[in-house]
Image (spheres, rainbow, N blue to C red):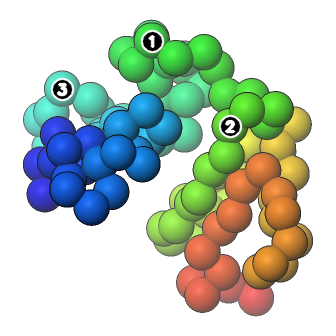
Amino acid sequence: MREHDLPNNEYIGELVRERLVYYPTVTRESFRNQGRLTEVIESGRLFGDTGLPPLDPAVDRAMICGSAAMLAESCKLLDARGFQISPRQGELGDYVIERAFVEK
């Protein structure tokens, strides 16, 4: 799937066109956006590149999946910005994590 496919998708395009920001970033290969997601958020680069305001729990939501270390780092970043994690499936929060891979 290419970067511009989602907004033009016949099934979900209308739903995501004005609400979803896709910002691909890599850590190893040469690419226009480089760095860990947490780094581009902390540095402000994500917001400068997209023209969006910094993350705000009053209007933003996040879904995070990845390694246990990435989840922990992302949770710390969001918590520091006033976001509240969804305590369990079915309960609202400002962000959710993929719990299947969380180390207990």
Residue at coordinates 48% horizontally, 68% vertically from top-left?
66
Contact between marks 1 and 3 (CB within 8 A): the answer is: no
* Image coords of residue 49 (percent x, y): 37, 16
- Dot 2 lies on which element? loop
Q: Residues within 10 Å of mark 3 (few under 14, many from 20)?
A: few
Residue 32 is marked as 3
Marks 1/3: CA–CA distance:
16 Å
What residue is disc 1 on? 51
What is the number of the mark on residue 60?
Answer: 2
- Sooner in the amino-acid sequence: mark 1 or mark 3: 3
| Rendered-image quadrant of the N terminus | bottom left
73 to 3, vertically: above or below? below
Say which quarter of the image contains residue 93.
Answer: bottom right
Residue 26 seen anywhere in this rendered image of the structure: no
- Mark 1 vs mark 3, foreground winner is 1
N-term-proximal mark, 2 vs 3:
3
- Give the mark count: 3
Judging from the image, what secondary structure is the residue with disc 3 in? loop
**Along the horizontal axis of the image, is 17 left or right of 2?**
right
Image-quadrant location for residue 24: top left
Q: Which part of the image, by quadrant, shows the C terminus?
A: bottom right
At 57% from the left edge and 84% from the top edge, which residue is drawn? 101
Q: In whole angstroms, how far apart are the C-alphas of marks 2 and 1?
A: 15 Å
